[in-house]
Image (cartoon, rainbow, N blue to C red):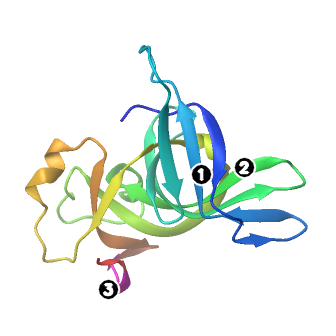
Amino acid sequence: MEDIDGVYRWVGPPLSDDSKRTQYPGILVQYKPRGKSGNDHLCLFKVGFHVLVHNADNLPYVAEIEDLYEDKIKKKMFAKLRWFYRYRDAKHHHKFVVPPHEREIFYSGHTDENDVSVIKAPCFVVFLNESQLVPLWERHLNNAFICRYELKFPGLAPIGVDKLR
């Protein structure tokens, strides 16, 4: 799927509402595909979904949506994202005996809050235990990744059972 730039709207009733923020279960993005005519497309993102996020260098990063909310003071829409690290980022913090699979990413405890417009596309993350083999289908999907380890500084730990679905 191509990057998304469009109109963002909340989906569902508010989950919580206080004087500073209102939380929502999802966000709907309406956009026109670049270089194509025709009807607008819709893409739904919900808490728990995995997404591609681009930074200023236009490099895709993978994140999990932990929270979606509107800041009432700033009048802006935000997403709290939990980041996955790629090998290129993790190799500075861990010495790998064997380089991981090219589509392997590492779950982390790093979260931060971003404007929802940084979310560019949905992606798929398959959580595996250490002994499971990489599925063959992953090489046919551009936005598919595997995750077997959690990055815990200064090393790696196997993914917890709660993440294996």
Residue 162's place in the image compared with 16, above or below, is below
> Which residue bears the numbered disc 1?
27
Span colored in magenta: 157-162
**Does 66 lie within the magenta span?**
no
**Marks 1 and 3, how far apart in space?**
29 Å
> What is the total number of numbered labels drawn onto the structure image?
3
Q: Could you tell me which residue is drawn at 10 percent across and 67 percent down?
A: 133
Q: Mark 2 or mark 3, which has the lower sequence index?
A: 2
> Which residue bears the numbered disc 3?
161
53 or 95, nearer to the observer:
53
**Element at label 2:** strand
Toward the bottom, the furthest residue is 161
> Which residue bears the numbered disc 2?
77
Q: Could you tell me which residue is drawn at 60 percent across and 64 percent down?
A: 25
The label nearer to you, 1 versus 2, is 1
Q: Mark 1 or mark 3, which has the lower sequence index?
A: 1
Q: Can you give x and y, in whole percent of width and height, for residue 155 in the image?
A: 38, 74
